[in-house]
Image (cartoon, grey):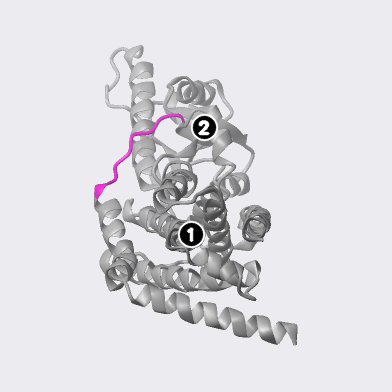
Amino acid sequence: MALRRSIRTIRAILRREFIDVLRDPRSLALTLLWPISMLMMYGYGIRYDVDNVPISILDYSETSESRDLSEQMRRSGYFTVVRFARDEAEVERDLMDDSVRAAIVIPRDFAGKLGAAEPTAVQVLIDGSDSNTATIAQGYALAIVNQFASTRQAGRAGLNTSPPITIASRIWYNPELKSVNFIVPGVIAVIMMIVGAILTALSIVKEKERGTIEQILVSPIRPLEMMIGKIIPYMVIALIDLAIIICAGYLLFDVPIKGSIFQLAIFALLYLFCALGVGVFVSTIADTMQNAMLAAIFLSLLPSVLLSGFVFPLEDLPAPIQAVSYLFPARYFVTAIRGIYLKQVGLEVLWPEALLLIAFAVTIVGFSASRFQDRLE
C-alpha cells in the first residue's frame, strides 16, 4: 500500500515537473540544441600541443645501436619510456589500456643493416584515439630517428649522406587522425554533466526561490519521493541529448561507434547517476539559482572539461592536478567512452572505470539523498 502511494506521488511530481519544463520552450530548445552547438565548436575549434608522450619500446635487436636509439628517444624530452616490452602482446596491451600513446619497434637486423649502410625500418605504432597526440608523436619519432641516422653517418666519410633508416608508421584506432573522433566522446561527457548536474540543481533550488518548498514540507510528499520525481525528467533529457550527440557525430562528422552500444549505454547511465547526485548535492548547499549555477559549474562543468582528459591529456598536467582529477567521474567516463567508441573494447578492459563510476555514483547519490532529506525534514 505504501509503495503504491509512493508511486502515485512520484508520478504526480513527474507530471508537474514535465509540465514545468515544457512551459519554458526556449530553455528546452537550448538544452536540446546545446549538444550540436558544442559538438561543432569543439569539433572544429580545439587544437593541442603536447610533450612527454608515454611510449613503450620493443627492441628485437638488443644491440648497442638499438640501445643508443632508445636512449635518444628517452633523452629527447618528447617521450617518456614507460616500458621496454618483451613481445608484441605487451605492446598491444599497453596501447589498449592507455598505458602508452605509442610504441617503438626496432627490428632484429637493425644493427647489421645500419652498419652496412643499408635501409632499415623502425616501426612506430601509435594510439590514434587521441589524434593530436598521435600526430605529434609521429613527427617527434621521425625527427629523432632522422637525427640519429644523420649523426651516425656524419662519422662515415665517403658514404652516401642519405639516412639509411626509415620509419614505418601505423596508426591504430584512428587511422585518419581526425580530431573529431575523440572530441565526440568528450562532448558526451560534458553535455551529460551539464544536464544531469546543473539543470537538476537549478530545478530543485527554483522551488526554494519560489517559496513552494514550504508547501511541499507541509504536504504528505516525502523528500525522497520529491527527489526522484525531480531528477527523472532530467535523466530523460540527458538520454535524449546522448542520442542527439551520437546521431550528430555520425551524420556531421562520420564518427561511428566501433564498440558495443549496450555497454556504452551502461557507462552512460552510471555516469548520469553520478551527475544527478552532484546536482542534488549542489541543491543542498545553495539557496538561490545564482549560487546553484556557480556551485554546479565549479563542481561539475569545469572538472568535466579540464580534468577528464577531454581537452588536455592528463599526463601533461602537473602531478597535484592529476591527483585531483581522480575525484571526478568524468575522468573515468571519458576513458571508457573513448575506448568503446574508438578501440572497440568493453568491460573486459574497462572494468576498473566501471567499478569506480559505480563507487562514485553510490557515494554521491547516497550522501546527496541523505543531505536532501535532512534539509527538507
- Give percent across and percent down for residue 226: 58, 70
Q: Residue at x 52, y 51 (%)?
A: 282
The mark that comes first in sequence, 2 or 1, is: 1
Magenta stretch, overall SS: loop
Front-most of residues 16 and 123: 16
Pointer 1: what residue? 208
- Give percent across and percent down for residue 223: 63, 67
Does residue 363 appear in the picture of this structure?
yes
Residue count near mark 2 (Cα–Cα under 10 Å), binned few <14, some 14–19, many ≥20: few
Disc 2/disc 1 C-alpha distance (Å)? 35 Å
Front-most of residues 266 and 377: 377
The magenta stretch spans residue 49: yes
Front-most of residues 177 and 221: 221
Residue segment shown in magenta:
45-53
Q: Residue at x 45, y 61 (%)?
A: 192
| 303 over 71 or under it: above or below | below
- Give percent across and percent down for residue 170: 41, 48
Q: Which mark is residue 321?
A: 2
Which quarter of the rendering shows the N terminus? bottom right
Q: Residue at x 39, y 53 (%)?
A: 182
Q: Secondary structure at mark 1?
A: helix
Where on the picture, by quarter, is residue 359?
bottom right
